Image (tube, rainbow, N blue to C red):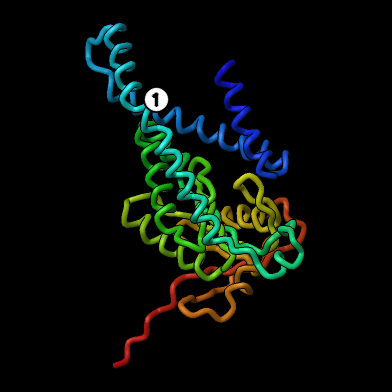
Amino acid sequence: MRADGEAAARAKFFLDLGFDPDDTVAMMRVVVENLGHVAEIMREAALKTLLRPGASEIEVAQASEQLALRSAPMLGPVMDDLVRLELRRSFESDAVTAAERAAGTLPGGRTVTVCFADLAGFTSLGEAIPPEDLERVATRFAEVAHDVARSPVRFIKSIGDAVMLISFDAVPLLHAVLDLIDIAAENDLPRLRIGVASGLAVSRAGDWFGSPVNVASRVTAEARPGTVMVAESTRDAAGNAMGFEWSPAGVRRLKGVSDEVKLFRVCRASVQVDP
């Protein structure tokens, strides 16, 4: 109860700074949820370090105590450094526009390009390899996606065998997902299916909601393994940007999307070599 009370008291600090109460609650909820995942990973890593064949319960408890005493002083500074790093990245990549400064508020929605990428055949793969190997495949995929998500592209989340990326500029995101296709192949990952859409979406608690999120998810299901499928909204947003080749993929009726969506496949432009 004391720890709970101390956490609540620290949360009040944000209210004292003038943060909206709803925003403060949302922020603390996301922190708690994500720290839960961190704690689980740390626990597994700690147990792998501590467990020895034939160790008694007392020996494991003693080793756990020693590890806790050694690590506790560094937990706070490590978390502090990571939060500062992510805040800096967020402010660098999401500048306040002139319209937002004039209005004195953030808009309800912003124009973004959204991408979902998933591992084709992941369910079948799960029947063929041990769960530990399947987890390593998903983890490696998320790591590769993190690597290609360079500003202004953002890695939003991983969902099992899929990842979500967004960008306020369609062109860097398209380059990133084409890199993702290549790097995944170099890492012997299953082939990827990637879907991309653009439009108005709203950010809340680190996630994104809106039509392009839904459309990108549905477009991913239409993509063949090893390809990037793009909604017309993203084709228009990319304009005449160099470095891409586009091919029409027809008009589809997507589940949960009211209007038909015109689709395109995109790949890198062929390099012409002068004779």
- The residue at 48%/80% (across/down) is 242
**Image spot of residue 215 (x, y percent):** 66, 57
Name the quadrant of the C terminus.
bottom left
Q: Amino acid at mark 1?
A: Arg
For label 1, the crowd category at 10 Å Cα-Cα, with few meaning under 14, some 14 to 19 and many 20 or more, is few
Q: Dot 1 lies on which element? A: helix
Residue closest to the eye, 132 or 28: 28
Residue 55 horizontal side relative to residue 229, left or right: left
Q: Residue furthest toward the bottom?
A: 275
How many marks are shown on the rendered structure? 1
- The residue at 43%/47% (across/down) is 142
Kindly indicate the quadrant of the structure image that contains residue 77. Answer: top left
- The residue at 45%/50% (across/down) is 85
Residue 271 horizontal side relative to residue 159, left or right: left
Mark 1 sits on what residue? 43
**Image spot of residue 265 (x, y percent):** 54, 68
Kindly indicate the quadrant of the structure image that contains residue 75. Answer: top left
- The residue at 35%/36% (across/down) is 133
**Image spot of residue 51 (x, y percent):** 27, 18
Can you say whether 158 is above or below 105 in the image? above
Residue closest to the eye, 70 or 60: 70
Residue closest to the eye, 220 or 100: 100
Can you say whether 237 is above or below 23 in the image? below
